[in-house]
Amino acid sequence: WTNPPSAQTLRTNTPRTPLPFPAMARLRRYQANQTYSLMRRTSERRYFLVANRFTRQLFFYLLGYHQELFPTIAIHGFCALSTHYHKQSTTKHTDNQPSDLGGFMRGFNSLAARAINVKLGRGENLWRVGKYNAVLTKGLTAVERQWLYIAVQAVRAGMVRWPRDNPGAYIPPEWFGTTRTFHRPKGAFFGGVRNKKADGDASEPLDLFGYQ
């Protein structure tokens, strides 16, 4: 990724062209117009995703970037803890079309790993070996319960007293129906040849999709 944009907008959605990243395992089959709960852990559950300004901005920026690439994927919930993250998304493709959710997840996980590894000065696997977790959530009640489960993750972990106090990357309910812009974190490097754009000297906002 040699020319990443300097800023990215993210529009969140209320529940209801593949990247050049090779598939490392057999492709999953995602049902059309269904909501999925997704989760990815770090290698050996190490604290690579500690809440700070860099990781928070990075996750939101990459969510927005991949929403632009895959407009059929709606994002309802997201929460990152020190060792893993949770995400809730709905696939909006039709039955006769392939889902973009796999491409979204592969690209998001790949670029997040590159940027965080560079930031931490390491080169090993950031994510746990194997696939990310993807669970189909059917019915509005189940979707809402899963969203609430994601929203209170920081509270369950004893990090904060209220979800709104979460210092990490977390989508609160008041964001529903909004579009927000997130700038590329300073120092975020995703691989390729360094240039002014990659180092954050340029500004190039993009319009993205989100909660409706």
Image (cartoon, helix red, strand yellow):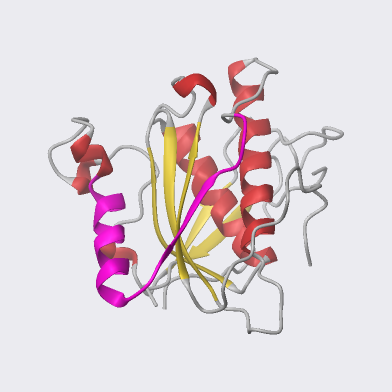
Horizontal placement of 45 versus 209: left or right? left
Image quarter of the N terminus: top right
User: In the image, which residues are magenta?
Assistant: 129-152
Where is residue 207? Give x, y as percent: 61, 69
Query: Foreground: 157 or 34?
Result: 34
In the rendered view, tell whether residue 78 sits above or below residue 168: below
Where is residue 180? Give x, y as percent: 46, 62
Pick out the residue farthest to the right. 193
Q: Residue at x 54, y 24 (%)?
A: 43
Q: Residue at x 64, y 15 (%)?
A: 121
Q: Residue at x 56, y 58 (%)?
A: 64
Horizontal placement of 40 versus 169: left or right? right
Query: Foreground: 41 or 181?
Result: 41
Horizontal placement of 156 versus 75: left or right? left
In the rendered view, tell whether residue 178 sits above or below residue 86: below
Q: Residue at x 37, y 35 (%)?
A: 81
Image quarter of the C terminus: bottom left
Pick out the residue farthest to the left. 161
In the rendered view, tell whether residue 156 sits above or below residue 181: above
Picture quadrant of residue 72: bottom right
Query: Foreground: 49 or 27?
Result: 27
Where is residue 184? Give x, y as percent: 60, 44
Q: Is residue 92 magenta?
A: no
Q: How many marks?
A: 0
In the rendered view, tell whether residue 122 sits above or below residue 77: above
Where is residue 153? Give x, y as percent: 27, 42
Picture quadrant of residue 94: bottom right
Query: Foreground: 194 or 41?
Result: 41
